[in-house]
Amino acid sequence: MPLTWRDAPLGAIDNHEATMKNIDDTQDMLGAAFLRHDDASASMRAEGERLEHDSAVYRTLLESTKAIPWKIDWATMAFTYIGPQIEALLGWAPSSWKTVNDWAERMHPDDRQKVVEFCVAQSQAGTDHEADYRALTKDGGYVWLRDVVHVVRTPDGGVDSLIGFMFDISERKRTEEKLARLQKELEDLSFKDGLTGAGNRRMFDAVMQREWAAGQESGKPLSLIMIDIDFFKAYNDYYGHLQGDECLKRVAGVLAQAARSGDFLGRFGGEEFVLVLPDTDADMAVKMAERCRDLIDAEAIAHVRSPHQQRVTASFGVGTIVPTDLSGGMDTTAFINLIDAQLYQAKDNGRNRIVAVDRAGLGGEAFRTHSR
């Protein structure tokens, strides 16, 4: 008797259904494969058209961006492609970019050697890299570019080609330069006295440390002049603080005129100023102090409460040292204190005077000179 579905064991029915499902799945798979390969030539044509379409899309996308794509064949060092955007940016037609020589020659002379050497070395090593440089425009100007380079390797590890993008970073560079200027201005302000424009105490300390170290290395003398405006409290009391500020600015201007290139003028505090004179011996330092005193006198700033012809005058402490092991263990702080003591002696002796001490002499022996 034939076995009916009803008579069949449950497991047999399950197996039969599973078998039929597998057959159906197999037929579906074969059908899909058959449909996929039904017309091979038509499929290939469709694939080719798709790839051609995709290539056109990619090129359109590349050429519509601000990034300028390019490719160089390593064996010939020739451009095989460069985006048309290059002409709008630099003025040079894409057809004029034939070899890497065109790229190098259209670079700022100050950038050319280091950029070319860097890019060649990185490319030879097979390393992707970036380079910023100024590119020459056809009308003779320059545009900041950033080249981002990818090295395409051959199967044996050699260099096949270079593919990259050029980016116009001129605006970024302008922003960076502006920030750098602002940073420098802030740094300058942090080292300048806001009233007189002379260096501030922070700058003075830094300059003294620097010149002290330079003197230790060179064995040359270092001189320091400390200047104090005479009877300045009486000046402020009589003329007022605003006029006192003007007096300070005028004296600072006079001292700046006296200073040589390489000298440092700073405001030590209140009505005190300092002049740091690198590579200056004791005689020259005293002459510099005398020049400063003469220039202040010539400025003829009225001071009715001054006994010195009713004019603003100043007192000077001067010192010279060679900051070596023969300095008797003296450091910058001790040296400044020594000069400060000469300044106060000048004030004690009647003001409008110069008192100098020289520790640069043989054996570090000191002597004083007085000048009226």
Image (tube, helix red, strand yellow):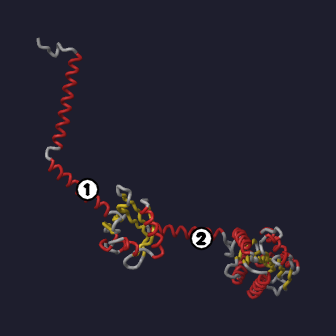
Residue at image point 16% right, 40% down:
34
- In this rendered view, identify the residue nearer to me: 118 or 203: 118
Q: In 3D space, how far apart are the residues under numbered discs 1 and 2 (Cα atoms)?
A: 53 Å
Q: Is residue 259 left or right of residue 153?
A: right
Q: Which residue is mark 2?
A: 185
Task: Say whether disc 1 or disc 2 marks the residue closer to the N-terminus.
Answer: 1
Q: Is residue 85 left or right of residue 212?
A: left
Give residue 326's position: percent from left, percent from top. Answer: 81, 71
Vertical relation: 33 (above or below) 41: above
Say which quarter of the image contains residue 218. bottom right
Q: Seen from this angle, which residue lies furthest top? A: 1
Q: Which residue is mark 1?
A: 54
Residue type for callout 2? Glu
Q: Is residue 323 left or right of residue 164?
A: right
Q: Seen from this angle, which residue lies furthest front? A: 156
Give residue 160's position: percent from left, percent from top. Answer: 35, 61
- In this rendered view, identify the residue nearer to me: 42 or 185: 42
Residue type for callout 1? Asp
Say which quarter of the image contains residue 352. bottom right
Q: Is residue 178 visible?
A: yes
Say which quarter of the image contains residue 306. bottom right
Q: Seen from this angle, which residue lies furthest left? A: 1
**Callout 2 crowding tier (Cα within 10 Å): few <14, some 14–19, many ≥20:** few
Q: Under tag 2, what secondary structure?
A: helix
Vertical relation: 187 (above or below) 262: above
The quarter of the rendered structure image containing the C terminus is bottom right
